[in-house]
Amino acid sequence: MGVQKDRIKFNVGGRVFETTATTLANAGRDSYFGALFNDDWDLLHSNNSQEFFIDGNPECFSILLDLLRTGYLHIPSNVPERLLYREAAFYGLINHVRSAKWGPFNGNRLRYCKSVTGRAPGDGTAIRAGPDGGCAVAHGSMVHVFDWMLEEHPPINLDYQRVNDIGWVNADSVVISTCERLGTPDGGMGLFTSSTGELRYKFNVVHGNQTKSFTAGALSFSPDYKIFSSCKGRSNEYGIGVWDQVTGKQIDFFYESSLGDADKLQWLNGRNCLLVATLFPRKDNCYISILDFRQKRMVWSWSDIGALVTVDEKRVRDAIAIEETNSICVVNEYEDLGFIDLRMEGGGVRWSSRSRLSTGNMLDEPCYPKLALHEGQLFSSMNDCISVFCGPDCVLTSRLRRSDGGSICDFSIGGDRLFALHSEENVFDIWETPPPIL
């Protein structure tokens, strides 16, 4: 591209900086600086004596200009990080700051960043990472939303309706599923603006031209902007509902009474199907199914009914599909990993003792283990520890643990961060992957 070689002056808050179009081109076309140039990165108003005035923070501008020059981010101790992030957002350089601050997500390189104390009474129930590195945390009927700078937005109050699940549609919107409040038509699901907590619209279940009251449970999303939720209603609308996340309109419903209490939903891109899991102890037996909405039927199912389950440690506590290996990974109370072959309907669980690890600090009130899959790595929580497994055989490669906060009741990965929510102290930890050392 044709790059102007003339020097360019900026007066930022009274301090003068000189740079070149070559350096500013590293900011990209969508940045503040991109608006000053034409398509060939020549100044729109070429004047060597011209000085651009910006009413901004000169210390932050110096850091960001150095980032454009070198690709490295150095934040002096006298500059608050949040101030730098706000200035970076003004210049359109947030992604540059993030790329320099965090490396590609790798569970084996995660480093503890900080802990955030809860803002509500009682234990936390769920945490969900946002696509931009923020998160949403549920405590009873309250949802507290944090942006990627970990600044808290106005909380979302569900008026005594207990939150069951949270899902991010994008960085600006969250879907919240709640229990139906006894004696009222409230409950179900709503889409909220994450920055203000404003309810944009509710998702209704319509059956026989009537709007039904229902309890919404686990959530999942597909790439074609569909939202899935397990639903439990008062009459015959038990099953899995499907809505358009853009319009909020119901577009499908899979009626099956055994699916209304599902704990886990997972959209499988390769199969274009939905995994639905109802787990112990919500039910005495565990049920895992794969639904194909195009065929309107279950195309695969598994249950431990009839299995030789005589002790609790063999009860499935969580499940997740690993499409690359045509298997479903399950975990029991003592973090034994098990695998179910998706090519064999009704087959047993192959428990892997090699994947079992020490349970860490045995706590007075341990939480049930949870599973997550991200960037080809498998993660499992147990007590106050999160384990990382890699490769087709899910070999244990590292552990993440903090000494305070109590048991981990939930964790989530997104935006190059891992968030771990502790149950006892109402606190969540943030783990980040540092940039590689060159």
Image (spheres, rainbow, N blue to C red):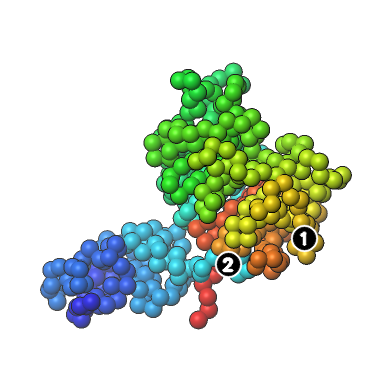
| Label 1 with label 2: CB-CB less than 8 Å | no
Disc ID at residue 296: none
Q: Residue 62 in the image: state x and y as whole percent.
A: 35, 72
The one of 24 and 224 positioned closer to us in this rendering: 224
Q: Nearer the viewer, mark 1 or mark 2?
A: 1
Q: Residue at x 73, y 42 (%)?
A: 303
> Can the viewer see residue 27?
yes
Kindly state the secondary structure of the residue where label 1 is placed. strand
Q: Tell me the crowding category of disc 1: few under 14, some 14 to 19, or many 20 or more residues within 10 angstroms, Cα based.
A: some
The one of 283 and 18 positioned closer to us in this rendering: 283
In the image, taking residue 308 as reference, residue 244 lies left or right, namely left
Give the Cα separation between the discs numbered 1 and 2: 23 Å
Identify which amino acid the numbered label 1 is placed on: Ser
Is residue 90 shown above or below 11? above
Q: Quadrant of residue 191?
A: top left
Q: Quadrant of residue 125?
A: top right
Is residue 1 shown above or below 138? below
Identify which amino acid the numbered label 2 is placed on: Asn
Q: Residue at x 30, y 67 (%)?
A: 28
In the displayed image of the protein, which residue is found farthest to the right? 310
Q: Quadrant of residue 246?
A: top left
Marks 1 and 2, the one that precedes in the sequence? 2
Q: Residue 155 in the image: state x and y as whole percent.
A: 50, 39
Kindly state the secondary structure of the residue where label 2 is placed. loop
Q: Residue at x 72, y 36 (%)?
A: 282
Q: Residue 267 in the image: state x and y as whole percent.
A: 54, 48
Q: Which residue is mark 1?
A: 352
> Can the viewer see residue 429?
no
Q: Which residue is mark 2?
A: 106
